[in-house]
Structures are given as C-alpha cells and as structure tokens.
Amino acid sequence: MTKKYAVTVLGGGSFGTALASIAADNGFPVKQWLRDETLARQINEQRCNMRYLPDYEINPGVDATTNVVEAVSGADIIFVAIPSKAFAHVVDQAREHLSKEQILISTAKGIQEEGFQLMSEILKAHTPSEHIGVLSGPNLAKEIAQKQMTGTVVASKDAVTREAIQQVLGCKYFRVYASDDVFGVELGGALKNIYAIASGMASALGVGENTKSMLITRSLAEMSRFAVAMGANPMTFLGLSGVGDLIVTCTSPLSRNFRVGYAIGEGKSLDEAVASLGQVAEGVNTIRLVRNKSMEMEVYMPLACGLYEVLFNQLPVQQVIHGLMTGQQNSDVEFVLPRSE
C-alpha cells in the first residue's frame, strides 16, 4: 500500500523546483520553501519559476512559501536543495522544528569548507533525524523538466529512507536507483564538478575527441582514488552517481561547471566566468577544498592541483595541460593494478 508522504523541498533553484513538481505529479502533497517572496508568489499564481525554469509548468499541487517553519512542520520527507555555502544556515533555521522520524535528503553537490564536511554529515550533526540520505546522479534539471528519461541514485544506510524516496520520485521518466554508500554517492556528485570545469576548458581550446575521452577517464580514476581514501566504495563510481554524473557534466553545455570552464578556456578570468553564469558553480570552491585536502592526505591528484593553479594562481591553461600530458604514466585502473611507488 502506498503511503501518502507529505513532502517538502527547501530551495527554489532549478533542481529543487523539478523535484517538487515530480512528487506532486506522483500525487503527494508538496511544500516548496524559497527565500524570494516574488518567486514564491509566481509559483503559486502562475505555476512557473521564471528565474530558473521559465518554460516548465509546475504542478498545482506544489505550495510555495517563504516561511521555513511552515514548510518543515508536518513534513514526512524533506529534500534540502540548497547550495553548499548556505546549506547549514538553512538547516539551522529549521532545526528546532524537525523530528527524528522525518526523512532528510540532501541534493547539494558540494563540500562545506569548515571541517571538510559533506552535506549528509551536516544533516547528521545539525538535526535529530534518524533517516538521512543523499540524492545524486546525472540530473540536469532542464532535461528533467522536459520529462526526458533520467536516472538518479538515493543513498542511505536506512532501507526505509531508500524505499520512501523511490516511491515519492520514481516515475516513467525519472528512475530512482538505490545505494547504501552515502559517502561514495555524495563524493561522486561533489568531485565531478571539478572535472567538468577541466572539460569545459579543454572544449574551448578545441582539443580532439581522443583527448576528451582520456580526460574523462583519468578524471574518474582521480576522483575515485580520492573518495576511496576518504572511505568510499570504489564500485560506487561505476554507477550513475560516479561515471554517469561525470559524463553528463563533462560533455553538456547545460552543466554550470562546464560553462565556467569553457569561459576560462576562452580567456575570461575566474570572476568574469562566474559572473556570466549567474548561478552557483559548486566546482570552483570544490577545487580549492579538494586540492588542499589531497595534499594533506597525500593523495595523487594532478588534475585537481593543475586546475587550482589555473583558477587561483593564474597559471596559463596550456602550461597546466602540458604538465598533465608529461606527468607520470602509471596504472590505468589502480584498483585492479595497484599504483607503483
């Protein structure tokens, strides 16, 4: 028997808006919290989010509000679709009105600088919930809004959480697969943003298809190497939240991080590239955090370190690419053939 979960989405961006409408399409009552009163009124009255998904008709079952207490009170499932920089702040606003029975799902693909914390760790530390998970995968919001076939992954140690999210979001065009590797799924979503910037830069420079293919596969090796050092399961990176998300983010101009990289490859400064985007590109901050963490942990990450030099020390892109191409040739898949010293 299908349970009638009350669903809340915290966040008014493109992905949060798409998730809210999917749940409402599936017959669940949905509240969506946004900071912007004008945008909330627009959703309620015009059934449209003109800022992020202007061509998408939002299901009438979505009730937008700017009152976070109203949004979370009485909810069974809460999706936290907030960029990593503001994630903890928004969660703290709702904390006193949350209970241990509520299911909390992060959709943010980023890392908090303080303590190098993932969003699931913030949910554990800042809320009483006993049902925490993450949602990640190759999920470009505009394509979801167009009802194009999309796969995603819900990861939680808790089977009740996984099954509830599959029930609320699963439909004929949005397929929800399950995992218990929360750390791996979450790191896959955060780390691939680094390599999307690299891929955008490479595309702007006009590299060949062989080069793009090598860049993506070496990116997968690097991100999985780092994640395993952090405690993730390497097999997770063969799935949607690993190689799947990496491919779409490294090849699509719909990807915000790809577009930032492309602008930098065309000669724009980092500030100019970010300003032209008009939205948050999580990968910029992630590069800095992961580069510093990899050096601390002594994890070999030439791509992330090279990108750091381009973005923050103004090293020429071509010089970094040359360094990568003349770097160490070691094992292809190091979990099959161990990396030699």
Image (cartoon, rainbow, N blue to C red):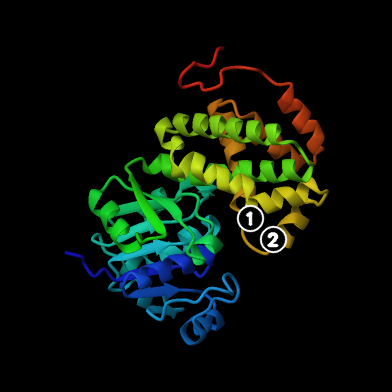
Quadrant for the N terminus in the image: bottom left
Q: Amino acid at mark 2?
A: Leu
Q: Position of residue 310 (x, y in %)?
A: 75, 40
Residue drawn at x 50%, y 32% as measured from the top left: 224
Q: Secondary structure at mark 2?
A: helix
User: What is the x, y in percent for residue 46?
Assistant: 51, 85
Q: Is residue 114 left or right of residue 178?
A: right
Q: How packed is label 2: few (under 14 Cα within 10 Å), some, or many (20 or more)?
A: some
Whether the residues at callouts 1 and 2 have beta carbons within 8 Å, the answer is yes
- Mark number, residue 142: none
Q: Position of residue 93 (x, y in %)?
A: 42, 68
Q: Is residue 289 visible?
A: yes
Q: Residue at x 66, y 50 (%)?
A: 258
Residue at 37% in and 44% down? 182
On-image quarter of the C terminus: top right
- Name the residue furthest top: 341
10 Å crowding of disc 1: few (<14), some (14-19), many (20+)? many
Depth check: give the residue in front, 38 or 97.
38
What residue is shown with label 1?
Answer: 256
Q: Residue furthest left?
A: 1
Q: Pick the residue in front: 284 or 49.
A: 49
| Left or right position of 121 against 36 | left
Tell which circle, 1 or 2, labels the residue nearer the N-terminal end. 1
Q: Is residue 190 above or below residue 4?
A: above
Apparent side of residue 122 relative to residue 289 in the rendered image (left or right): left
Residue located beneath label 2 in the image: 277
Q: Secondary structure at mark 1?
A: helix
Q: Amino acid at mark 1?
A: Arg
Using the numbered discs, state the Cα–Cα distance from disc 1 to disc 2 in whole angstroms: 7 Å
Q: Residue at point 60% right, 17% down?
A: 330
For residue 287, say whether it is visible: no
Residue 72, x across and y down, in percent: 34, 71
